[in-house]
Image (spheres, rainbow, N blue to C red):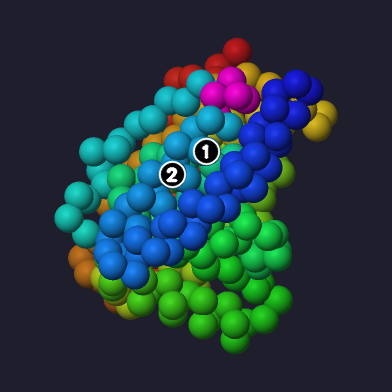
Amino acid sequence: MIRTILSVLWAVFFLIVWIPVLGIEWIIGKFNKEKMDTSSLHIVQWALNRINIICGIKLTVLGKENIPADQAVLYVGNHRSYFDIILSYTLMPGLTGYIAKDDLEKVPLLSTWMKRLYCLFLDRDDMKKSLKTILKAGDQIKAGISMVIFPEGTRNKGEEGSLLPFKEGSLRMADKTGCPVIPMAISNTGSIIHKGAARPTHVVIEFGAPIYPKELSKEEKKMLGAITQERIAGMLKEHQATYFQK
């Protein structure tokens, strides 16, 4: 329980004490937007890493060499916990926005930092707004900002290694922009919080080989979600066999 309390206190401390930094970053952005973006990215990655340390998370990272260094990409991951975001964000090599549920937009200060880092909020109950969000994400990719999406649409509470069906429409931005899709397999984040308390946990995050929509046939493009899901499922299975066998 002490880890949970400390991580929450740290998050509150950061959001409140660093309010002046938001103002400083805004001023920097008036003169050098790229410098503001990079600075904000590093500040948030540093803050999130503190949470990971407090919670005692051991992180194994695989496949970072699969992330293209010269262009924005769409990361597609499985989703079991809020720690999917906390952990993966610390690994992003460049400016990256997440597509998150719209409930987070209502959280003061947190939503301000998220918007500063190009995160978008998805209203899953309004198809028109959802489509608008996906199209905006595509525009951000064209502008050089990578995006992350969890196409299961909600946190999967099933057996470790299982996946909910991917929503094909959520990957439309990749088809429209032609950007590489990076399958991102995340294992064991669902075990971090147990009975309301954070506990030391081994988590594996793997970035798979890029999928290039332009290299797919017309029929394959229609199944981009299913293809990506299959890749992630394979990596999750390998994680279980290699790292989590009892």
Quarter-of-image position of residue 188: top right
Say what amino acid the circle numbered 1 marks. Leu
Q: Quadrant of the C terminus?
A: top right
* Residue named by callout 2: 43
User: Which amino acid, by three-letter code, is at mark 2?
Assistant: Ile
Image spot of residue 107 (x, y percent): 69, 59
Q: Is residue 148 left or right of residue 216?
A: right
The number of numbered badges drawn on the structure is: 2
Disc on res. 106: none
* Furthest residue toward top: 246
Q: Residue 155: where, in percent of width, then height?
A: 66, 50
Residue 156 lies, in percent from the top left, at 66, 48
What residue sits 54% from the left and 24% below the top? 53
Q: Position of residue 43 (x, y in %)?
A: 43, 44
Residue 219 shows in the view: no
**Cα distance in 3D space between marks 1 and 2:** 9 Å
Q: Earlier in the sequence, mark 1 or mark 2?
A: 2
Q: Nearer the viewer, residue 165 or 50?
A: 50
Taking depth in this image into account, of 83 and 23 the one nearest to the observer is 23
The kind of secondary structure element at disc 1 is: helix
Give the magenta part as a residue range: 52-56
Task: Say if the magenta span includes residue 54.
Answer: yes
Question: Taking 104 as reference, is 64 above or below it?
Answer: above
Name the image quarter holding residue 117: bottom left
